[in-house]
Amino acid sequence: MNTAIIVAAGQGKRFGAEKPKQFIEILGKPLIIHTLQKFEDCPAIDEIILVLPFEEIEIFGQIVEKFNIKKLVKTIAGGATRAVSVLNGLNAINTKSAEIVAVHDGARPLVSLEEITQTIKKAKETGAACLAASVTDTIKEVADGKIVQTIDRTKLRRALTPQCFRYEILKRAFAANKIGEIVTDECFLAEKLGIEVSIVEGSPKNIKITTPEDFILAESLLKQI
């Protein structure tokens, strides 16, 4: 069984709104619903576990009733960090039926069904796969306020989500690492364990909504779908 862990446990303080950004509406639907519907509609996903701030779970229960999200099997509380939130979601999976785990940011509603499917497929083949996008800007390494060198951007990628793993690999990656340190994504934990992570080329449109400007862009892109 392939499980999507949708992580939306942040408070969205950088967004500057009165309520968490995942509940702000885009085109008549809360942001988190747009994201959930992508995984609901993806045939490669069998079930969804949603991770939210504890205090928002009851409110979400009232919201989700209005939408047809049948694959959502559990809504659980997150932790103080993203890594803890993902681990909480991972611990909620039925170990007997677990196959591929797809971890996705709740604030990325523009992921395509093809991107989800291909990343899961690659993880089945190799054990671990990360959706990624090319870097288009020229990247400089700096020190003491000065450019040291220009980095070859053809070797660089921006890590997107979903990031997909065989269940046992992701469990092992969390067990072997201290998640109290700064952990920005699951691939980082796999890399530290010496696990090779394959890349699936994704679209730069798969943005993470962090600022009000991102919200405007996402609204424009969603209108085109």
Image (spheres, helix red, strand yellow):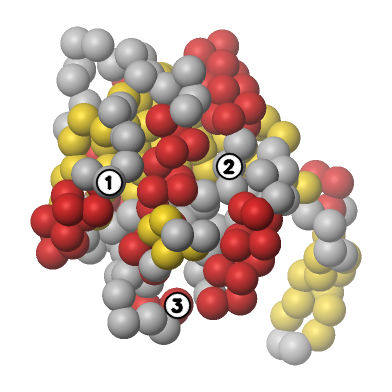
- Is tag 1's residue or tag 3's residue first in the polypeptide sequence? 3
Amino acid at the residue labelled 3: Phe
Residue at 24% across / 11% down in the picture?
97
Percent x, y for residue 101?
38, 27
Q: 149 or 44: which is nearer to us?
A: 44
The quadrant of the picture occupied by the C terminus is: top right
- Residues at discs 1 and 3 in contact (Cβ within 8 Å): no
Disc 1 versus disc 3: nearer the observer: 1
What is the quadrant of residue 50 in the picture?
A: top left
Instruction: For mark 1, give the secondary structure.
Output: loop
Q: 85 or 190: which is nearer to us?
A: 85
Percent x, y for residue 26?
49, 62
Q: CA distance from mark 1 to mark 3?
A: 25 Å
Residue at 29% across / 28% down in the picture?
70
Amino acid at the residue labelled 2: Val
Q: Going by the image, does 28 lie left or right of 3?
A: right
Q: Going by the image, does 103 lie left or right of 191?
A: left
Residue at 51% across / 13% down in the picture?
124
Q: Residues within 10 Å of mark 2 (few under 14, many from 20)?
A: many
- Residues at discs 3 and 2 in contact (Cβ within 8 Å): no
Q: Residues within 10 Å of mark 3 (few under 14, many from 20)?
A: some
Judging by the rendered image, the residue that carries numbered circle 1 is: 66
Q: CA distance from mark 3 to mark 2?
A: 20 Å
Q: Residues within 10 Å of mark 1 (few under 14, many from 20)?
A: few
Judging by the rendered image, the residue that carries numbered circle 3 is: 15
Percent x, y for residue 154?
86, 46
Disc 1 versus disc 2: nearer the observer: 1
Judging by the rendered image, the residue that carries numbered circle 2 is: 111
Q: Is residue 139 above or below residue 109?
A: below
Query: Is residue 17 in view?
Result: yes
Instruction: For mark 2, give the secondary structure.
Output: loop
Instruction: For mark 3, give the secondary structure.
Output: helix
